Image (tube, helix red, strand yellow):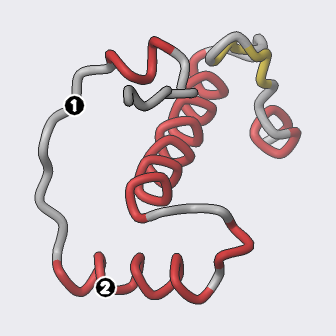
Amino acid sequence: MREICHKPLVMRLQDRVPIRIPRSMMNEVDRIVSDHPELGYNRQQFVESALREKIEHIIVLESASSSRLPMTLRSHVRLPHRSLIEG
């Protein structure tokens, strides 16, 4: 019987690349995922989420420093934090 994949087609077809992460860092990820099932992450999802948050944070900082206009990120309008605009 064929397994049904409920992920969007874009996610299934997305090209992936291998990376190397220090074992101690991966052990900490595994501990967090194991100790906090309420977060709903597996190892892969945790790492992807952390990277995505870091990328989004840097994009916000770049946007705030290059202009004072709102930026668009993945179909969402994101405004720079008030402290970035005022500072």
- Residue 73 lies, with reference to residue 55, above or below; the image says above
Q: Which secondary structure lies at badge 1?
A: loop
User: Horizontal and vertical percent for residue 51?
Assistant: 43, 48
- Give amino acid for label 2: Asn
Instruction: Report how far apart the C-alphas of labels 1 and 2 lie in the structure.
Output: 22 Å
Q: Against 51, is 77 above or below?
A: above
> In the rendered image, which quarter is residue 77 located in?
top right
Q: Hey, what amino acid is under mark 1?
A: Arg
> Residue 12 vs residue 71: left or right?
left
Contact (Cβ within 8 Å) of mark 1 with mark 2: no
- Whole-percent x, y for residue 50 in the image: 49, 55
Circle 1 Cα neighbour tier, 10 Å, few/some/many (<14 / 14–19 / ≥20):
few
**72 vs 35: above or below:** above
- Which label number is shown at residue 16? 1
Quarter holding the C terminus?
top right
Q: Residue at x 59, y 36 (%)?
A: 61
Q: Find residue 21 and report its horizontal and vertical position in percent.
A: 18, 66
Residue nearer the viewer, 62 or 3: 3
Label 2: few (<14), some (14–19) or many (≥20) C-alpha neighbours in 10 Å: few
Provide the secondary structure element on which disc 2 rests. helix
Residue at the image point whose x is 74% and y is 73% from the top: 38
Q: Could you say which disc has been placed on residue 72 in the image?
A: none
- Report whether 14 appears left or right of 51: left
Whichever of callouts 1 and 2 sits on the residue coming sooner in the sequence is 1
**On the rendered image, what quadrant is the N terminus found in?**
top left
Q: Nearer the viewer, residue 80 or 17?
A: 17
Left or right: 72 with respect to 5? right
Mark 2 sits on what residue? 27
